[in-house]
Amino acid sequence: MFDRFNRYAAFGAAIAGLSLVSACSDSSTSQGHGMLEVQLTDAPFSSDSVKRVDIFVVRVDAKQASSDSADVARGATDDSATVNGWTTIATPKQTIELLALRSGLFTTLGAKSMSTGSYQSFRLIIDPSQSSVTLKDGTVLTSTSSPNVTFPSAARSGIKINLTTPVVVASSDTTKALVDFDVSQSFVQRGNAIATHGLLFKPVITVRAK
């Protein structure tokens, strides 16, 4: 429940888990192209107050070099990743209802032919202005409502995806990356009631093999 997050006074993280399945190949491969497909799912969510969580996903980017939070945020408001080594994998530009993606369900965000090699950084670009949380009583919390949902940025936000292992794209093969958005770890109740004080949102992405 959200109350336990309030007790910890911290965000848990978001999208649990980015699940990545890559064809087994030599990560040092530097020539050719392989397909990289990105999927989205949600880990179990426990709340007596929330009916649905809608996140507007603009795009998913990847790069072969490692990145810090500043690099992930850089260029998040652009229409595509064109600098600092980022490559856009998917541009769904649509609202995803995360609570509909539980119990092993997922949705495909997109796929793109990528240069072969080892990808060490991923980021999810969302639009907070088109994202919301709907409570079971019908109240819709947005970034501008009162109460509201406080997002990392009022504009587009670049969310860092922490990888436990790099994603290897092999020549003439398809690598699948499952982004697991753990909603239950992504929101913290402010004050003593969601309907009065709203929620905080600070997503963190984790990785597991599919």
Image (cartoon, rainbow, N blue to C red):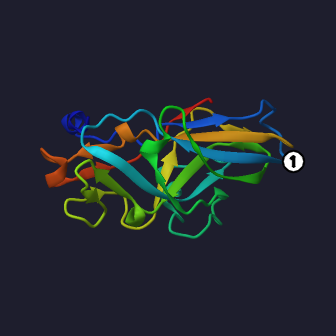
- Front-most of residues 53 and 206: 53
Q: Residue furthest front?
A: 137
The answer to whether any part of residue 66 appears in the image is no
Q: Tell me where residue 150 appears, x and y as whole percent.
A: 29, 57
Q: Tell me where residue 209 appears, x and y as whole percent.
A: 61, 29
Position of residue 9 relative to residue 145, above or below, is above
158 left or right, relative to 185: right
Circle 1: is it few (<14), some (14-19), or many (20+) Cα within 10 Å?
few
At mark 1, the secondary structure is loop
1 left or right, relative to 114: left
Query: Residue at the spot x=24%, y=59% of the render?
Result: 148
Q: Amino acid at mark 1?
A: Gln
Q: Tell me where residue 184 appears, x and y as whole percent.
A: 36, 37
Query: Residue at the spot x=50%, y=68% of the render?
Result: 77
Query: Residue at the spot x=86%, y=43% of the render?
Result: 172
The C terminus lies in which quarter of the figure?
top right
